[in-house]
């Protein structure tokens, strides 16, 4: 394992984050339908990271970055780009370190997410395009000296998400298969780094939406890519590109990537509601969709871990997204 | 404390139930709205009993009763009456002891609940009236020798629910105020019995729907009552009567009972969705409704515990019930 992601370092990062981050619960998936949902003998454990502060794992990475800033950097503030969960996490983390957050979000961002970032004290500017968001954040970096807090790239972000994996390994014993969602790959990289050191033989599968399969393409081509035309209801798993650090950690640790369709995500949202009493945004249903679909064969009879990575969605949007096909 | 509810006994019951009951998580209520929801300095901890097996605390009591049956009793089976959560719990508990369950439910019971009881192997008979349900269960008791598993009355049921209180006391330290929902009072009696022994000075408040205030009436009149015209959206908190054992334990341990309206329950369902990412049936929002309403003054600056007691509801019903006023 690369030194910055050693288990000793992950323990230290967890200790550093402990006042700002929740230990999120893990529950066993109890299926209550008439037919088996998974192959016989399969046991599934779900880390409920949606009960994390700010509603998603993103706070682990953002807090680790912002906590490392020196007083001069904190006096200049941070900037970020995000469609939602990272915006809220960065706003929260900035507020905890009493620094200012200037966040660029798409004008199509869900109202509830914009509202939550603002409630944590961020200044939010809505932009027409992804390109504009990144350009304006770059401007804020150069002109105001703000620190750019990336939604998924870089060792510090990955160290933060690794604490979720460490936590999970203390909540459940002997996992054979771990299934992790991939947007930019920040969660997958960190979580995998932790559990690979604890369970060396664990099989790790990443899950991407079919319409936002940037990491799958990168895995095949062996390099980072840009894909402008991402299109999925799992908007939290749909950055338009892969980045080198996160890609290289995922490539090293993840055994395979599987894809799930929007329809499979909708079905999984309904299944999670029925079985686990969870009403989550599409991204948080990706791992469940993979279990019910492309991974059925590979989980048979095994002890399987998944994560509900987060949710920031209105009840109206939950209802609409989980129904429409 | 009466001997059958001593803390030593509760420990023993927990040990006896451990293979059939989940340890449910407790999370801190993180408010993310623009204004304070609770008075300054108030901290709220929520026991997520909706992640219990069968989706509600009911399994703790039903399992304790059914586990105590001898082989002859188990060979004759159990019977129960319930609008939902107790039916599912009794069906599950019966299946775990390989005994048969004959359950009488109202024909107005939510489809999902009937389905879940059947999925656990119960025979469900839908009845026209509450009276018919009880009469037919009585018949099954006399004619088939089935054991009647009460939804809330009796020492064994209360011992079962007490394990939730014991668990909570190990998850959170130094609670000043505990708020518990009351339908028949089974959860409230048991939970209170446990925590009163651990935190002798804890203030305990019960919450009932305005339209199903049987325990509040019993508290005032000092005796059990029957009230046929219960009417609330919190159907899981609406038995038509109080019973002597549960009433007497509640009367001894609960400091006061407050009432919440159906509108307050609907608002609380929305607040729980917004802040805690929980989509629950009305009954599970009762304690939150009390915090936001009649208990505001009494929780100020304190460490407060509440319980989301369970949920078995379709996403359609969640959406409808949390909206309509």
Image: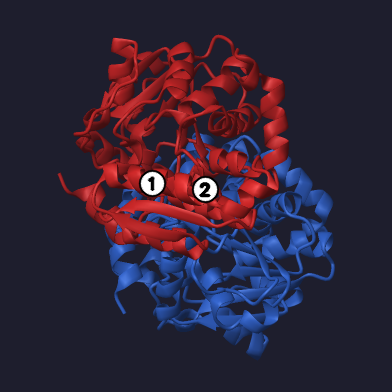
Chain colours: A blue, B red
The quarter of the picture where residue A203 lies is bottom right
Q: Look at the numbered discs 2 and 1 and tell me whether their residues touch, using CB distance below 8 Å.
A: no
* CA separation in Å, label 2 and label 1: 16 Å
What residue is rendered at 72% in x and 74% in y? A301
What secondary structure is found at the residue carrying circle 2? loop
B198 lies above or below A134: above
Q: Chain of mark 2?
A: B
For mark 2, what is the residue?
B146
Q: Are the residues under marks 2 and 1 on the same chain?
A: yes
Label tally: 2
| Residue A70 screen position, x and y as percent | 63, 39
Left or right of residue A48, residue A162 in this image: right
Q: State whether residue A118 appears in this view.
A: no
- Image location (x, y in percent) of residue A283: 47, 67
The front one of A146 and A108 is A108
Residue at far bottom of view: A221
Mark toward the start of the polypeptide (2 vs 1): 1
Residue situated in front as seen by the camera: B198 or B190 = B190
Q: Is residue B12 above or below residue B135?
A: above
Q: Residues within 10 Å of mark 2 (few under 14, many from 20)?
A: many
Name the side, left or right, on which B147 lies relative to A222.
left
Residue B244 is labelled as: none
Label 1: state its secondary structure: loop
The quadrant of the image that shows the C terminus of chain A is bottom left
**Residue B162 visible:** yes
Image point (79%, 65%), residue name: A196
Instruction: Name, please, the residue furthest toward the front.
Output: B143
Q: Percent x, y for residue A146?
A: 49, 49
Residue A145 or residue B314, whichever sits in front: B314
Residue of label 1: B82
């Amino acid at each position: 394992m690369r030194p910055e992601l050693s288990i000793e370092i992950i323990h230290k990062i967890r200790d550093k984050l402990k006042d700002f981050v929740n230990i999120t619960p893990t529950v066993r998936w109890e299926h209550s339908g008439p037919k088996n949902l998974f192959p016989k003998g399969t046991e599934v454990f779900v880390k409920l990271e949606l009960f994390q502060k700010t509603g998603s794992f993103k706070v682990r990475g953002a807090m680790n970055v912002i906590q490392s800033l020196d007083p001069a950097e904190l006096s200049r503030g941070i900037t970020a780009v995000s469609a939602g969960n990272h915006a809220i996490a960065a706003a929260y983390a900035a507020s905890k370190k009493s620094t200012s957050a200037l966040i660029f979000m798409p004008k199509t961002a869900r109202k509830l997410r914009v509202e939550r970032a603002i409630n944590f004290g961020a200044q939010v500017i809505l932009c027409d395009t992804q390109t504009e968001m990144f350009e304006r954040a770059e401007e804020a970096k150069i002109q105001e000296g703000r620190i750019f807090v990336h939604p998924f790239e870089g060792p510090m972000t990955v160290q933060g998400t690794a604490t979720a994996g460490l936590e999970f390994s203390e909540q459940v014993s002997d996992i054979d298969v771990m299934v992790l969602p991939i947007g930019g790959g920040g969660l997958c990289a960190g979580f995998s780094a932790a559990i690979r050191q604890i369970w060396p033989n664990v099989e790790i599968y990443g899950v991407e939406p079919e319409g936002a399969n940037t990491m799958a393409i990168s895995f095949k081509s062996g390099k980072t890519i840009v894909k402008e035309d991402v299109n999925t209801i799992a908007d939290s798993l749909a950055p338009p590109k892969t980045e080198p650090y996160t890609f290289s950690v995922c490539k090293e640790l993840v055994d395979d990537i599987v894809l799930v369709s929007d329809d499979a995500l909708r079905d999984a949202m309904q299944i999670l509601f029925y079985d686990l009493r969870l009403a989550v945004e599409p991204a948080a249903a990706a791992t469940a969709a993979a279990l019910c679909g492309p991974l059925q064969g590979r989980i048979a009879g095994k002890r399987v871990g998944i994560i509900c990575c987060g949710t920031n969605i209105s009840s109206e949007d939950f209802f609409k997204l989980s129904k429409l096909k």
